[in-house]
Amino acid sequence: MSATTHRLETPGTDLEHWQLRVDLAACFRMAAELDFHESVANHFSAAVSEDGTKFLMNPRWKHFSLIKASDLQLLDSNDSETMQRDDAPDPSAWNIHSNIHAKIPNARVLLHCHPTYATALATLQDPSIKPIDQNTARFYNRMTVDLGFGGLADNEQEGERIAEALGKHNVMMMGNHGVTAVGKTVAEAFEDLYMLERACRTMILAYQTGQPLNVMPDDLAEKTAAGWDDFRAAGTAHFEQFKLLLNQKDPSYAD
């Protein structure tokens, strides 16, 4: 690529590409509505090439609640000059997302943020999610916990380490940091992020009672987690319903 960023001038020239932009922009607005964002930090991305090396991502230091489809930058993991340009993305965003998309091509959509309850749980010595109700059991044996935090991901090494820690998983609790969710579609990744924050809220509230957790036995936890597979379509419906709510309030995300 000769340029790091690209604004699609005529949305209709590539409807699939534009729809991905619209859905990802909607995801930023949803995260802002749910208070999953943090200042002008945190970042979401979506691969547009088969190998994952080319991807859309939010520009540096733009508030989630203001992001539009046309704002998203088109970046290339193989472009060594990306961070030298005037419109370079946030360094931590570049190091995390370029490494994950390049090394894990099936991570088509990548959502990284620091929502309140998930981040609080990530600060504990044991930040794992115990199967104590239906939502927490959703993630039983279906996520990973990264306890190797190496500081702000402002260097290539930390980005590579995070990609290796994520591996084949769709959800990662990032100790001393936050969370990451990946999926085949924006809706799929968003639903995991949404349910993860709810599960973490349940964990934090349960811990606050000071009483022992009623952790499900392994067979029940696995049965409950497997049962969620039949409800995957609900995630897409949830995303579409949320977009309808956004359209009523402020449809500018699709611009």
Image: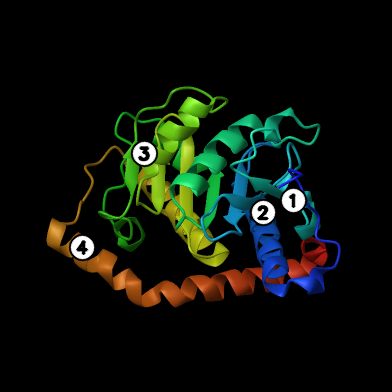
Percent across and percent down for residue 69 are: 76, 59
The answer to which quarter of the image holds residue 109 is bottom right
Q: How far apart are marks 4 and 1 (CA)?
A: 37 Å
Percent across and percent down for residue 195 are: 45, 58
Residue carrying label 2? 28
Task: Identify the residue at horizontal 61%, vertical 37% (top origin).
Answer: 94
In this rendering, the answer to whether 167 lies above or below 109 is above
Percent across and percent down for residue 32 are: 67, 50
Would you say the residues marked 2 and 1 are in contact, meaning their CB atoms lie under 8 Å apart? yes
Residue carrying label 1? 65
| In the image, farthest residue toward the right | 9
- Between residue 192 and residue 8, name the one nearer to us: 8
Q: Earlier in the sequence, mark 2 or mark 1?
A: 2
- Between residue 11 and residue 43, name the one nearer to us: 11
Q: Which of marks 3 and 4 is nearer the N terminus?
A: 3
Residue carrying label 3? 165
Q: Which of marks 2 and 4 is nearer the N terminus?
A: 2
Residue carrying label 4? 222
Residue 114 visible here: no
Say what amino acid the circle numbered 3 marks.
Ala
